[in-house]
């Protein structure tokens, strides 16, 4: 947690208003301290002068929820990370922004990040949490739980409702927040409503985030939301944007493992092609079980072509019927998997799925869309598309169907990507049941 350093020889320390309340409760033995507002820097120290009389602390001001993002609670106590780095082999602090941070998916994800499970046990992190006016109190509750968890690697937490404040210097942006589809809502309406959100967030990232920020879009429809976001962030490489299809990949691996009677770690080289919708294509042609092609292990090819594909496509809806709500824990796990696939080298011969910008792809898929494809990484946050894959007529026909859907979605949000007037000619309502 944050370290407070007191220096009795210095005067007129500078603090945030939120620090004053904390210190007024925790410094009863100090006779006199005077404070001024703090312009926070990474290596600032808290200090005060000691006088023989009573403690005097200014009244704490109530923060306007519309004001700029503020550090939260104990995380407002600044620290000297350089001093800690002299005695501990920690890496440089990284800034991770999360939208929809008061939701169920984030509630699982944030604690995995703070614990070191995602970026490693020697990687200190700063969490920048974006919510809305409606969720600001819930966001404070999330920050309180992060405080109480005592994660040593979690050095800073800030919360806010303005993406231009929250995304400042972000090196990772995990965009989870999106409006759910309500009763009677047309898919075109959902594309527009959430597209407006992601256009605004793209502009904010473009203005204030790190130039090499890595963006993972989770909010649905995630492929087209990612396209809108990247089109509104021209100063950030389009290659840095991802739409989350890793949960679909994990679900496909699970079904193949169940059918083959093996544990899931024996399943590799699974690709999800295309859109995160019921047109997605779980690829069993290139997948392997214990190093062998799936079709050599699973002899029931009819099951592969029909039941396997449908189970993966509709797994979200099946879960809702059992659980009463859409997946949150498994989604957060898949976000962790997606990040770790980018920050650790891909095992030799294997690959992972991610929705990425299709320009320059080697498969003949239309350019200008965000399309899930097989990727490999050297562990530096970047990736390359896998070239040594087999595409037969069966697989190609299904790839073209999901491609057509994404091209139609692109036309439907043209007003949000700077490509003209929107024309919605969606081929059908293929939203995943889990997104309703």
Image (cartoon, rainbow, N blue to C red):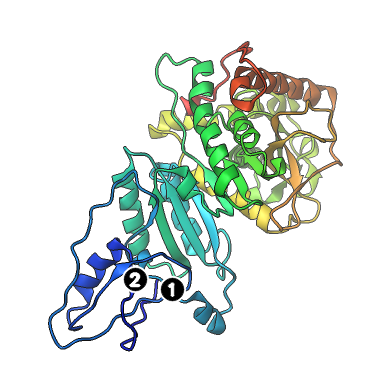
Q: Residue 255: x percent and y percent?
A: 62, 37
Whether residue 207 can be seen here: yes
Q: Nearer the viewer, mark 2 or mark 1?
A: 2
Which element is circle 1 on?
A: loop
Residue 31 placement, left or right of 321? left
Q: Quadrant of residue 380?
A: bottom right
Residue 151 placement, left or right of 349? left
Residue located at (50% from left, 80% from top): 84
Q: Is residue 119 above or below residue 90?
A: above
The residue at which mark 2 appears reads as: 14
Q: Is residue 133 above or below residue 4?
A: above
| Distance CA(mark 2)–CA(mark 1) | 9 Å
Q: Is residue 113 above or below residue 185?
A: below
Residue located at (40% from left, 71% from top): 78
Q: Which one is in front, 211 or 278?
A: 211
Q: Which numbered marker is on residue 44?
A: 1
Whether residue 149 can be seen here: no
Residue 244 placement, left or right of 270? left
């Amino acid at each position: 947690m944050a370290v407070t350093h007191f220096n009795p020889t210095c005067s007129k320390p500078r603090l945030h208003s939120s620090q004053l309340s904390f210190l007024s409760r925790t410094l009863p033995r100090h006779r006199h301290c005077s404070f001024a507002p703090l312009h926070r820097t990474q290596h600032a120290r808290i200090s005060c002068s000691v006088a023989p009389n009573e403690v005097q602390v200014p009244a704490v001001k109530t923060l306007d929820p519309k004001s700029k993002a503020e550090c939260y609670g104990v995380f407002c106590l600044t620290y000297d990370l350089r001093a800690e780095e002299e005695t501990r082999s920690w890496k440089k602090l990284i800034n991770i922004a999360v939208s929809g941070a008061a939701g169920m998916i984030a509630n699982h994800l944030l604690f995995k990040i703070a614990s070191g499970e995602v970026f490693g046990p020697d990687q200190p992190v700063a969490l920048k949490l974006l919510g809305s006016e409606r969720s600001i109190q819930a966001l404070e509750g999330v920050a309180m739980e992060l405080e109480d968890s005592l994660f040593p690697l979690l050095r800073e937490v800030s919360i806010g409702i303005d993406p231009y404040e929250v995304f400042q210097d972000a090196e990772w942006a995990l965009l989870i927040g999106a409006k759910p589809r309500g009763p009677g809502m047309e898919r075109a309406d959902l594309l527009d409503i959430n597209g407006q959100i992601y256009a605004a967030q793209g502009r904010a990232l473009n203005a204030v985030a790190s130039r090499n920020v890595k963006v993972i879009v989770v909010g649905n429809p995630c492929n087209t939301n990612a396209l809108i976001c990247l089109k509104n962030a021209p100063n950030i490489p389009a290659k840095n944007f991802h739409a989350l299809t890793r949960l679909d990949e994990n679900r496909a691996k699970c079904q193949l493992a169940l059918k083959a009677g093996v544990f899931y770690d024996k399943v590799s080289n699974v690709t999800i092609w295309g859109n995160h919708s019921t047109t997605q294509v779980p690829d069993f042609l290139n997948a392997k079980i214990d190093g062998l092609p799936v079709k050599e292990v699973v002899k029931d090819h009819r099951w592969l072509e029909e039941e396997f594909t449908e189970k993966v496509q509709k797994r979200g809806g099946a879960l809702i019927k059992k659980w009463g709500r859409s997946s949150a824990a498994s989604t957060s796990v898949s976000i962790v998997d997606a990040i770790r696939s980018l920050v650790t080298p891909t095992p030799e011969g294997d690959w992972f799925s991610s929705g990425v910008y299709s320009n320059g792809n080697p498969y003949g898929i239309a350019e200008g869309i965000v399309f899930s494809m097989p990727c490999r990484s050297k562990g530096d946050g970047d990736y390359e598309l896998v070239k040594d894959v087999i595409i037969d007529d069966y697989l190609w026909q299904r790839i073209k169907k999901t491609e057509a859907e994404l091209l139609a979605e692109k036309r439907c949000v043209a007003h949000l990507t700077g490509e003209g007037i929107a024309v919605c000619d969606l081929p059908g309502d293929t939203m995943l049941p889990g997104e309703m």
